[in-house]
Image (cartoon, rainbow, N blue to C red):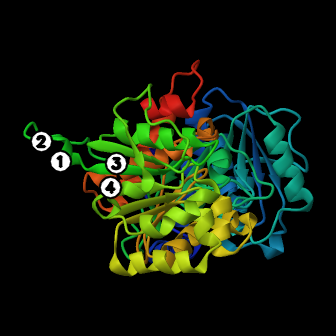
Amino acid sequence: MQRVSPDRPWPLFDVAAVRRLEQAAAAALPAHTLMQRAGLAVARLALAIAPHARTVWIACGPGNNGGDGFEAALHLKQWVKDPVVTWLGEEHRMPEDARKSLQRARDAGVRFAGEPPAQWDMAIDALLGIGSARPPEGMLLEHIARLDTGRAPVLSVDLPSGLDADTGHAGVCVRATHTLSLLSLKPGLFTAHGRDASGAVWLDDLGVVPATEAPCATLSTAPAPPMRLHASHKGSYGDVAIVGGAPGMTGAALLAARAALQHGAGRVFVGFLDPSAPGFDADQPDLMVRAWNSLDFPAMSVACGCGGGEAVRAALPRVLRARALVLDADALNAIAADAQLQSQLQARGRRQSPTVLTPHPLEAARLLQQDTAAVQADRLAAARELAKRFGAVVVLKGSGTVIAAPGGPVRINPTGNARLAIAGTGDVLAGMIAARLAAGEDAWTAASAAVYLHGLAADRWPAGQPLTASALAGA
C-alpha cells in the first residue's frame, strides 16, 4: 500500500481496463482471493488512520464494494474494534464473492444494524465504488448525506461513492478524508470533483500488476531543474512576445510578460493592443514594449490573448505565424467565433508548429460548440477532442488540470489549489509556457512542466500570505 503523491508518473486506468484487470486476476487466483485482500487492506488503512477509534461505521452497498466492507469489518472485529455494518442489499441478488464475505462477517460476530450508529469514531464508505451506474437515491443517498455530515474520518473503498471513476464528475457523492484505490488508480480521483471528494489517496494493487493494460492517462511529475550553461547568453534562452492588453486590460499582458521573464526567457517583448498603453513598465524595466505589429513573430515564442478583448481578433492572423505559440483567453474566444481563424490554427497543427491552447472550461466549451456542463462532465474527453481538432497541446484548466496531446498521451496535473481561482493566474501560466517554448522545449513538455510548477507555487505559498497573480508572477 502506498500514499499517492506527485513524485512519479502514476498510471491511471479507466473502469473498462480495471474490469479487465479484475477478471484476469480473479481467473488466475483462488476464488474470493481479491475480495479478501481488499478487505484486509481497507482494515489496515483504517487502523492506521484512526488507531484509537472504537466504533467504526461501515456503510456497505449491494455489490462487491459492500463485500470489501464486510471483509474489513471482520478484521476490525478481530482487532477488538466495534464495527457496525449497515447493509443496503438483498442476499438473493448479491454477487457470489460478496455473499461469501457477508457470511464470513456474520460468522466473526460483526454487528449488523438497520441504521448508522448514533456516534462513530470513523466511517468506511463501501457503498458503491466503481459500480455506480446512476445517481444515488433512496437509502443510498441518505447514507451518503450521513457520511458527509459526520466529523469523524471517512475512508472510501476504491472511490468515493457517487463519484465517476473515469471523469471525476459527481452530483452527490461522499466527501472522504481518505480513499483507498484498489488494483489501480482511476482518473476521476484527480480531476473535476475528484480532488475535493477523495481526500488523501492511497493505492493497493492487491498484488496484481497491470502488465497487459495501457493507462488512459498519467499524473504529471516535477520537471527536471533547468540547466543554464556558463557559456550561454540571452539568445540561448529565446525571445518571448506577449500580445494582449487591450484598453483597460494591460495588466493581464504585463502579468504574462513578467512571468515569462521570471521563468527564464532571454528577452521578453510586450505588444500592447491598447495604442495608449505606456511604453515602459516601471516595476519591471527588463520588459521591452513594442508595437505589436512590429514584432518578428516567426522567430519568437508568442503568448497571445491575455487581456486581448475584441482587439485581439485583428492581431491573430499574424500571430498564428509565430514559431511557437500559446493561445489563451480572448484569443481562444476569437478563434471560437471565426471559422477562418480556426482553419489557420488547424494548418499550424498540420505543420506541427509548437502550439499550446490554455482554455478554462467556458473557453473550451466555446471552441467545441458545447456548454460548460458538457465539458466538465468529461474533462479528459474534452481535452482530447480539442487537441485532435486543432493539432495542438491542450491545457484544460481547473481542478486537476488536464493536458492532452493530439492523438497521444494525456496527463492530469496533481498540484495546485483553490488559491489559484483568482483573476490573472492564467496569464501567469501562459507566460511560463511561452518561456519554456522559447528555450526550445516541445509543446507537450513545456505545457506539462509549467502547469506543474504553477500549481506547486500555490501549494507552497505561505499560509498567512494572500496569493495574488502579480506575486505569483514574481515567484
Q: Amino acid at mark 3?
A: Ala
Which residue was labeled with disc 2? 232
From mark 4 to mark 3, how far is it between C-alphas? 5 Å
Label annotation for residue 435 = 3
Q: Earlier in the sequence, mark 1 or mark 4?
A: 1
Which residue was labeled with disc 1? 236
Q: Are the residues at dot 4 and dot 3 in contact (C-beta closer than 8 Å)?
A: yes
Label annotation for residue 437 = 4
Q: Are the residues at dot 1 and dot 3 in contact (C-beta closer than 8 Å)?
A: no
x, y percent for residue 399:
61, 50
Q: Earlier in the sequence, mark 1 or mark 3?
A: 1
Q: Amino acid at mark 2?
A: Ser
From mark 1 to mark 3, how far is it between C-alphas? 12 Å
Tell me which residue sits at (29%, 53%) in the image.
438
Tell me which residue sits at (34%, 75%) in the image.
352
Q: Amino acid at mark 4?
A: Leu
Rendered view: 84 above or below 20: above
Tag 2 secondary structure: loop
Please tell me in which quadrant of the rendered image residue 353 appears. Answer: bottom left
Tell me which residue sits at (27%, 45%) in the image.
224
